[in-house]
Amino acid sequence: METEQIRVQEVAAPAIEVKNVVKIYKLYDKPKDRMKEAMGFGKKQVHKLHYALNGVSMRIQRGETVGIIGTNGSGKSTILKIITGVLHPTSGEVCVDGRISALLELGAGFNQEYNGIENIYLNGTMMGFSEKEIDAKLPGILEFADIGDYVHQPVKTYSSGMFVRLAFAVAINIEPEILIVDEALSVGDVFFQAKCYHKFEEFKEQGKTIVFVSHDLSSISKYCDRVFLLNKGVLLGEGTPKEMIDAYKRVLVGQYELPEPDESGDLLQDKEIRGAAGKAMGKGRAPRDDGGEGDPDGSLNPQVLEYGSGEAKILEYYLTDDRGMRTSAVIKGSVFTLHMRVKFVQHVAAPIFAFSFKNVQGTEITGTNSMIEKAFLESVDAGQVKDVTFTQKMSLQGGEYLLSMGVTGYSGDEFQVYHRLYDALNVTVISDKNTVGFYDMDSRVCVSEAEGKPEGFGGKTV
């Protein structure tokens, strides 16, 4: 009985446990201040304390695929470096049970003067493998990296894409029990990324633990079992990818006055967590195009192309999600709304409000306007301000898109552009299922036993 209890405890033991970790850096205004303090000159403290991590705790079970998300400077890379032993915490404890393979910063663990083969043996030796064991693994590493004869050249001559190919190939072929990846996959091309994520799936089936940091929310949504949300060194919450991505979108725009908890269970309702978020981020304001403050998530295009005859002016524009929260990230399949505030400088007989989506390559994907929708066919007087909304379901595939909008109309038979904004807003569509082409047909598939003869189906029989 006692043996069984010990066995249960062993099975339940986490792969990674982070206990109340704090990481503090001393910041100096001038380099000479650091030297003065180190040599004991002066009694006045000349440094400021920066909490890269402030009391962070995480428990990651064996076989889990866990994502860590957050804004730049939130401590994501710092926590990974502490888990892998690259950094030591100021206080707190980290327990790791299993062989770790880490792909952190580009170039970490590689000698720039060595060629690819030499670096493979260098990394393998550092991980405790014998030369004979590395010999056996070498074909698999070279096949996965697929960089051809460049493997015999010094890695200092590699492109960033070739570098990450080799680094990832080494990381996954040394039989790790825990794989840790920090944004490195964003360097490789789309085909290599697909290859890496397929490897993630294999690792999951083998019961291995994966921890990765990424700004690609679609990948986080698709591959992760759980997600941790960090902000300015504070752990705001943990939960399902959907819960944490939704919370992250609100962090981006400083929306902390949250609605009452619904059935899905919002992990940012706790007052202490909300307070930590408020201190970390401060109050946010909506994206504006009228000189006002704000663009907290960097979604506005600072070089937006705008033109028009000036009879109308788009003062403000932004998106809201299905909860009514301002955002630039929309989950595929959910309802979102485009908001435009338009001021009319002159009388306009029948203004037309419009928007369209392009992909990053510049291809026009979809769009509509108030005339097509037969939504507004009235005249507007000078000085009036209109709030315009377009509400629809997001059916585009996961990825990055550019949103354009405008106010147009007709003067007699002549088409007029009063104000148009091209590529004004970057919109991220988050998806855990991308189909073929630009949009999802949202098909419902049913497979059942056939009844009767094939001819009875009404189609062509092969």
Image (cartoon, helix red, strand yellow):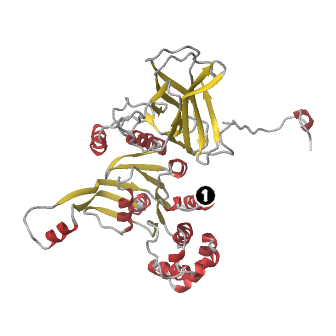
Residue 458: horizontal and vertical position, in percent? 89, 33
Q: Is residue 370 visible?
A: no
Q: How crowded is mark 1: few (under 14 residues within 10 Å), some or many (20 or more)?
A: few
Q: Mark 1 points at which residue?
A: 190
Residue 23: horizontal and vertical position, in percent? 27, 60
| Viewer-proximal residue among 142 and 270 | 142
| Viewer-proximal residue among 458 and 7 | 458
Q: Is residue 154 visible?
A: yes
Disc 1 residue type?
Val
Residue 117: horizontal and vertical position, in percent? 56, 81
Picture quadrant of residue 15 = bottom left
| Viewer-proximal residue among 283 and 324 | 283
Residue 60: horizontal and vertical position, in percent? 41, 56
Q: Left of 295 or right of it: where is 358?
A: right
| Viewer-proximal residue among 93 and 331 | 331
The answer to whether 212 is drawn above or below residue 42 in the figure is above
Q: In which quarter of the image is the N terminus?
A: bottom left
Residue drawn at 48 percent across, 56 percent down: 64
Q: Left of 410 or right of it: where is 242?
A: left
Q: Left of 332 or right of it: where is 319?
A: left
Q: Left of 138 or right of it: where is 424?
A: left
Most extreme residue toward the left, as rendered?
43
Q: What element carries label 1?
A: helix
Residue drawn at 52 percent across, 58 percent down: 186
The answer to whether 54 is drawn above or below residue 318 in the figure is below
